[in-house]
Amino acid sequence: MSDTKPKMIRGKATRDFTDAGTERRFDAGKAHDFTEGEFVNFAAAGLVEAVDTAADPKAKTAA
């Protein structure tokens, strides 16, 4: 059996929102780590955008 971790994508919330399924809160302008599936869904809804950590190493991280 494989113990692979899901691919994580660094994203920044474009506005404040709460995920209805998990009730996780995301604040606008803060960077978060999302699974690939979360990121695709949130990006399609216009809630997140990718963060280029190489270009923006001081991106605010969520606590």
Image (cartoon, helix red, strand yellow):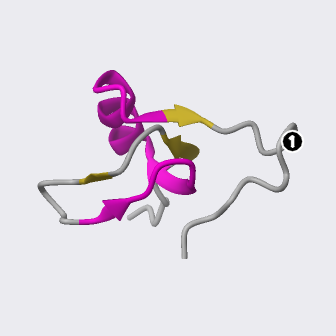
Kind of residue sitting beneath label 1: Ala
Q: Is residue 10 magenta?
A: no
Query: For residue 40, what is the image quadrant?
Result: top left
The residue sitting at 66% across, 39% down in the picture is: 51
Q: Quadrant of the C terminus?
A: bottom right
Figure check: 29 above or below 43: below
Query: To which residue does mark 1 refer?
Result: 54
Secondary structure type for disc 1: loop
Residue at the extreme bottom: 63
Figure check: 31 above or below 63: above
Figure check: 16 above or below 47: below
The residue sitting at 55% across, 43% down in the picture is: 11
Would you call the spot at circle 1 few (<14 residues within 10 Å), some (14-19), or many (20 or more)? few
* Residue range of the region highlighted in magenta in the rendering: 24-48
Query: For residue 23, what is the image quadrant?
Result: bottom left
Foreground pick, 35 / 23: 23
The residue sitting at 13% across, 54% down in the picture is: 20
Residue 62 % position (x, y): 55, 67
Q: Is residue 16 left or right of residue 59?
A: left
Q: Quadrant of the N terminus?
A: bottom left
Q: Is residue 40 magenta?
A: yes
Residue 29 % position (x, y): 56, 48
Foreground pick, 25 / 1: 25
